[in-house]
Amino acid sequence: MLDHQPLLDLASALGIGLMIGVERGWSQRDKPDGGRMAGLRTFTLIGLLGGLAAYLSQQQGIWVLIALAALVGLIVVASLVRTPYDAGNRGITTEIAVVLTFALGATAGYGEHSIAAAAAVVTTVLLAFKPPLHKWVENLERPEIHGAIRLLVMSLVILPVLPNEGFGPWQALNPYLIWLMVVLISALSFAGYMAVKWAGPRLGLIVTGIMGGLASSTAVAVSMARLGRGSETVRPAAATAAVASSTVVYIRLLAVSAAFSPTLAGRLAPILGAMALAGLVVIIIMWPRRPDARDSARAGEDLHGMKPFSLSVPLKFAAVLAVVMVSSAGLQSWLGDAGLLLVSGIAGLTDVDAPTLTAAERVARGLPAATGALAILIAVAVNILAKFTIIAWTGGRDMAARVAPGLLAALPAGALAWWLVR
């Protein structure tokens, strides 16, 4: 029977070359015939050549792939040699794209379609967005570059080598999780800083807060409090972002509970729904007005004097987290299941996911849903108060006054819903 796999591999390689070729052909459409190093047809053929090279190498040996890759390299070198030097417009982007297209075609030829297609899409995006990418780089300032480098070191160099296991009393201290929180707070601070710079103080921070709430609303609270303290113009959006991130948490916790225990989720749904609704109403009321030109200029001046992120705040928070980890583990070891409510309250000082997962897992093993729901709600209530305290401590009195209605309105709403459904 005919084996269709090689045909699929070659079709994938052909499609990759076609996709990159369309972008290159369009970007060089104003150049005269003969003035382009490679266009639509050339890139399509190069992708197909890569696929054929991979296919033949599997039949005849790897030397076929090496020889054809060397041939493509020689063609690129010859093109560079014969192209006249233009001091104002000299680059090798197209030549690099040619080599990359061959490599991606070969990857598809070996059957790795997903990897090849994903890399081809990224390549096409990078090629197509040259002007905005160059403008973005031109507008970067030295503190932002240094901040990005520090963040990369923290997340890609330090974090992976930390042990993801328990140490110390009751094996409660997990270096990986503690440092992950440091990285998360720093990343959210950096993202918020850049969002304000590029999208403005009204929208940039709020989007950051909503997305950050999917990961850690406590980290968002720390980050937004710092940003809000540093700029009076940024403060309204930072406060709204902190409230929005906390509101997102109620929906997130409901989804987490449903994944482990639908019974528990059914018990929590009206309560967390009421809390989310209260937060949403306050967000609509406190949504910051559109800044005028003077406000935008002032925000720019405020931002110029700020750092993309500071390590002091997340490190202090990590120290508190470590204390809470040890305390929670000790109480749980001492009191057992009877201490679930107390442990949930202590854990809620820094995080609501851990007590939620613990309660959901125990409900799935037979704990009454009402008890599990109460443990989660205690953690949520303590977390709300903890976030408000953090914001007041880090962001100052003005920032605390702005977030108070949005954060604290969820407490009576949740209590009323609990009383109605109990």
Image: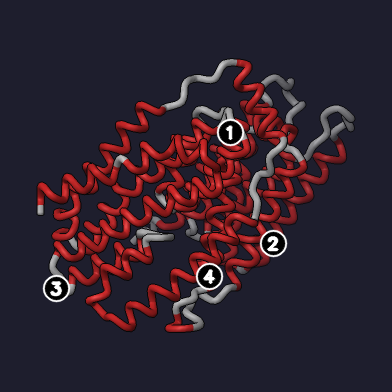
Report which residue position mark 3 lands on. Answer: 366
Q: Secondary structure at mark 1?
A: helix
At label 4, the amino acid type is: Tyr
Q: Nearer the viewer, residue 275 or 125?
A: 275
The residue tagged with tag 4: helix, strand or loop?
helix
* Amino acid type, mark 2: Ile
The residue at the point 32 percent across, 83 percent down is 334
Name the residue beneath numbered marker 1: 196
Point out the frontmost of discs 2 and 3: 3
| 4 vs 2, front mark | 4
Q: Residues within 10 Å of mark 1 (few under 14, many from 20)?
A: many
**The disc labelled 1 sits on which kind of residue?**
Val
Which quadrant of the figure contains the C terminus?
bottom left
Residue 326 percent location from the top left of the image: 45, 76
Q: Is residue 79 left or right of residue 24?
A: right
Q: Which residue is mark 4?
A: 176
Give the percent coordinates (x, y) of residue 55.
Answer: 54, 59
Q: Earlier in the sequence, mark 4 or mark 2?
A: 2
Contact flag, marks 1 and 3 (Cβ < 8 Å): no
Instruction: Determine whether the residue tagged by mark 2 lies in a helix, strand or loop.
Output: helix
Amino acid type at circle 3 is Gly
Give the distance between the C-alpha atoms of the residues marked 4 and 2, in whole angstroms. 43 Å
Q: Is residue 57 left or right of residue 399?
A: right
